[in-house]
Image (cartoon, rainbow, N blue to C red):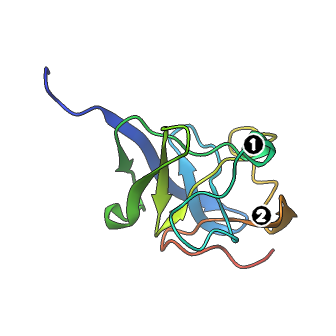
Amino acid sequence: MPGSPEQGTRIVASNSEFGQMLFDSTRQAIYLFDVETTSRPECYDACAEAWPPVLTTGDPVAGPGVEDGLLATTERRDGTVQVTYGGNPLYYYAHEGKGEVKCHDVFLNGGNWYVVRPGGDPAPPG
């Protein structure tokens, strides 16, 4: 339909060994970086190679178990648009496959990485 806004990245909640957590629609695990205390991303360069940001080209879409009011976006330095949830920029881990959760409570790139629960908070350390 002409003029319709483009649908963005779909975020869903699903079960994992850490309880309910966020994934994208392809079942790629989603993380937050605990050194980021605002929605402004701090993970760039080598950090972003290991932890690619969850990007979107339209408004992010809340799938099952995800609170629409917690989804938002922030602009990165390069002009791309990163999905945020509960005020936290969201990331993937580059070295895990669909449905894998290998990096919860891992210290890398100057901070800890945690999977994100549907309420927007990090899952407890594993």
Q: Residue furthest front?
A: 77
Q: Nearer the viewer, residue 43 or 29?
A: 43
Using the rendered view, name the quadrant where residue 104 is placed: bottom right
Residue 10 percent across, percent down from the top left: 43, 44
In percent of the image, x 37 and y 65: which residue is there?
67
Task: Indicate whether 27 appears above or below 15.
Answer: above
Q: Residue furthest left?
A: 2
In percent of the image, x 69 and y 39: which residue is there?
98
25 left or right of 59 in image: right
**Dot 1 corresponds to which residue?**
45
Rounded to the nearest angstrom, the CA distance separating label 1 from label 2 is 21 Å
What is the three-letter code of the residue carrying label 1?
A: Asp
**Dot 2 corresponds to which residue?**
104
66 left or right of 37 in image: left
Residue 114 percent across, percent down from the top left: 71, 66
Crowd around label 1: few <14 · some 14–19 · many ≥20 (10 Å) = few
Task: Indicate whether 16 appears above or below 83.
Answer: below
